[in-house]
Image (cartoon, rainbow, N blue to C red):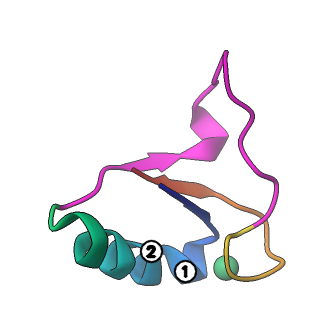
Amino acid sequence: MYCVCREHVELAIDKFVDEYEDAPDLVSLGSTEFSAWTAPEHCEWCANKAEVLVV
Ligand SMILES: [Zn+2]
């Protein structure tokens, strides 16, 4: 699972496919509420706001 900014979505998808050999689901963090989990504020690979969850 990766929490990334929009710029790093493609990188996250590549890594996900490498690791799990399956296509990920993309979840927009702005439109989804999580009750038991708080999304990280920042992208996995840069200081930008994390906007997309790749799972
Ligand atoms: Zn980023």
Element class at badge 1: helix
Element class at badge 2: helix
The part of the chain drawn in magenta is 23-42
For the residue with label 1, is its CB less than 8 Å from the closest atom of ligand 1?
A: yes
Residue 40 position within the rendered picture, expressed as x and y whole percent measured from the top left: 76, 51
Crowding at dot 2, Cα within 10 Å, few <14 / some 14-19 / many 20+, comes out as: many
Q: Is residue 28 above or below residue 23?
A: above
Q: CA distance from mark 1 to mark 2?
A: 6 Å
Q: Find residue 12 and name its label.
A: 2
Could you tell me if the residues under marks 1 and 2 are in contact, i.e. CB atoms within 8 Å?
A: yes
Residue 20 position within the rendered picture, expressed as x and y whole percent measured from the top left: 23, 63
| Apparent side of residue 49 relative to residue 14 in the rendered image (left or right) | right
Q: Can you identify the residue that label 1 sits on?
A: 8
Residue 12 position within the rendered picture, expressed as x and y whole percent measured from the top left: 44, 74
Pick whichever, 41 or 28, lies toward us: 41
Numbered marks: total? 2
Q: Residue furthest front?
A: 19
Crowding at dot 1, Cα within 10 Å, few <14 / some 14-19 / many 20+, comes out as: many
Camera-side mark, 1 or 2:
2
